[in-house]
Image (cartoon, rainbow, N blue to C red):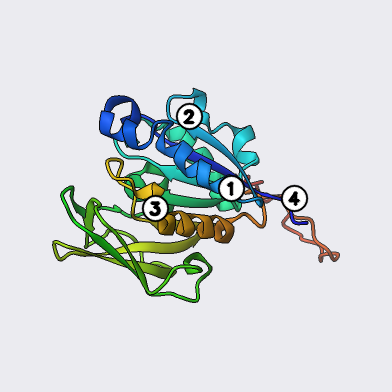
Amino acid sequence: MSPSIRVTVWGEFRHEKKNPKVAALYPQGMHETIAGFLRTHADFTVRTAWLDQPEHGLTDAILSETDVLIWWGHMAHGDVQDAIVTRVQKRVLEGMGLIALHSAHYAKIFKALLGTTCSLKWREATDKERLWNINPAHPITQGIGEYFEIPAEEMYGEPFGIPEPDQLIFISWFTGGEVFRSGATWQRGNGRIFYFRPGHETYPTYHQKEVQQVITNAVRWARATVCIPDACPNAKPLEPLPADPEAATRPTVGHR
């Protein structure tokens, strides 16, 4: 039997404490709602972490035991410590998967890994969102039909300031007429990244079965298969080298 996929679901856990509407939809926090449906799968081991924990709940020990990190952020991107961003980025480059949800497009970790503005236009109103599955053979879209709809969601519109995706998975259309690249993947170092657009806090999006299916599929797709630490060792030759007459006078140069 294959070892379970170790998932850490990270959320700010701020809106749920400040906005009664959000608290009614997600009484234990959005991160716990996501963790809850993932825990119904026997091949997942799931933990949660949030912003106001020490080290934002993302210690070296926890990250070393995480195959896939799911990130939801919105109102407090600036409160995330840069040292923790660097720590998470290192783990992704080593092989950990990252799933960025909704407003995590503007999270420090997402922008650091993609290297672009990740900006967009938005509207919180009464839009219906129709997500078109444009990559039906991809593992992330398994069990999803030609499209699915979310009755009410925050609108995100193009242009979306991301680098060209390795694979485009979903394109959304909104009642107001906008379209958006709402599901996309990238490889950074040894880690896989998936961005999935739906999930504004004042809508019950994470209770919808299609959204849950996409996130579940994405965890299996993004799971870490390697952990290759960053290193720059001084390498000894495998074969004898010719004598170097200038070696004694050449200054030693260190590498980091």
Q: Earlier in the sequence, mark 3 or mark 1?
A: 1
What's the amino acid at mark 3? Gln
Q: Earlier in the sequence, mark 3 or mark 2?
A: 2
Residue under label 1, please give it. 40
What's the amino acid at mark 1? Thr
Instruction: Decide which of 175, 5 is in the foreground and name it.
Output: 175
Number of marks in the image?
4
Residue under label 2, please give it. 56
Residue under label 3, please give it. 208
Q: Nearer the viewer, mark 2 or mark 1?
A: 1
Alpha-carbon distance for marks 2 and 1? 25 Å
Residue 88 seen by the camera: no
Label drawn at residue 248: 4
Q: Earlier in the sequence, mark 1 or mark 4?
A: 1
What's the amino acid at mark 4? Ala
* Viewport quadrant of the N terminus: bottom right
Q: Position of residue 58 (x, y in %)?
A: 53, 33
Dot 3 crowding, Cα within 10 Å, few <14, some 14–19, many 20+: few
Alpha-carbon distance for marks 3 and 2? 28 Å
